[in-house]
Image (cartoon, rainbow, N blue to C red):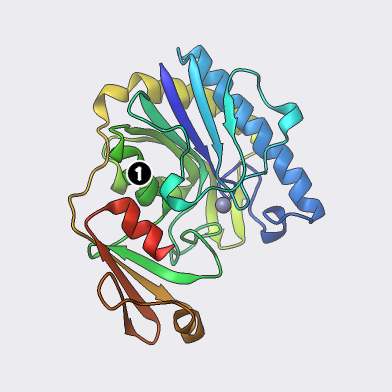
Amino acid sequence: MKIYVSVDMEGIAGVLLPEQLKKGERAYEEARKLLTAEVNVVIEALIEAGADDIYVKDAHGTGYNFIASELHQGARYCMGATNVANRFPGLDSSFDGAMLIGYHAMGGTEFAVRDHTMTSLGWQSIHLNGRPIGEIGIDSLIFGLHNVPVLFVTGDNKTCGEASKEIPNVRTYETKEGLGRHAALVKPPKLVYRELKEMIKESIDNRENVLPVTLDGPYELVMKFLSTDQVDQRYFDGRRSKRINGLTAAYSCDDILEVLSLAF
Ligand SMILES: [Zn+2]
């Protein structure tokens, strides 16, 4: 069984402050330890559940957050910067399923730890074909392009709620309860590791009930920015990319990866 695991940092047990997510901060070094420990638990549980080929993507910020020397030997790790059209290097239709670990809710979600979509500094919201979408939705569509279902999502309670809306029958696990953007009712990481192992087994057993996420084209992605100068700096060709008003831009295309590449 072949599983692709994408790992963000905001939804990892014990992580909730901006300084934990930023290179150079002391708190970041501790957060990397929590991140690496949780990744190792996921791999251990996947192997116990029958996975024999595991690909793990370090998907936060620069893509270099795992502490390489401490990583479990049972997986391959994709680290470093990639562009949105190649967000999951090595992904193809040979994978049996995907997992989104340590994720966060879309930008604008109330009482969600570190809510944002792709970047905290860039834009307020993104709509795809008229529906608000965050990273869970975008990533499950990218996995869906390769016919790979997302079986399991972890993060705060808002992340799990968003995942259940985007992916019918997906299994989720709450690592914390959001009390605000920088506040949460935190579960002790050691408890999370024990419960996570159980949930991963359950999500593998549940895999026949989850379908790949798909969306028929053509695609229109509408982005609402934080300030007008961010939109001023963008190029619009008037066909596939247009400025709608001071704060809003729209990108349209028949190909989902192309529309994401145009926008991001
Ligand atoms: Zn992140």
Horizontal and vertical percent position of residue 1: 40, 16
Q: Is residue 58 left or right of residue 103?
A: right
Horizontal and vertical percent position of residue 64: 66, 44
Tell me the crowding category of disc 1: few under 14, some 14 to 19, or many 20 or more residues within 10 angstroms, Cα based.
Answer: many
Which part of the image, by quadrant, shows the C terminus?
A: bottom left
Mark 1: secondary structure = helix
Type of the residue with mark 1: Ile
Relative vertical location of residue 10 with respect to residue 245 in this rendering, above or below: above
Horizontal and vertical percent position of residue 163: 37, 45
Residue at (50, 44) in percent of width and height: 155
* Extreme-front residue of the structure: 237
- Please identify the quarter of the rendering in which residue 38 is found: top right
For label 1, being within 8 Å of ligand 1 is answered no
Residue at (67, 60) in percent of width and height: 18
- Please identify the quarter of the rendering in which residue 195 is found: top right
Name the residue nearer the viewer: 234 or 65.
234
Residue at (57, 22) in percent of width and height: 75
Q: Is residue 160 left or right of residue 24?
A: left
Q: Is residue 210 left or right of residue 264?
A: left
Horizontal and vertical percent position of residue 35: 65, 39
| Residue 20 seen by the camera | yes
Relative vertical location of residue 61 with respect to residue 46 in this rendering, above or below: below
Residue at (77, 44) in percent of width and height: 30
Name the residue nearer the viewer: 200 or 92.
92
Residue under circle 1? 142
| Residue 158 seen by the camera | no
Number of numbered discs present? 1
- Please identify the quarter of the rendering in which residue 252 is found: bottom left
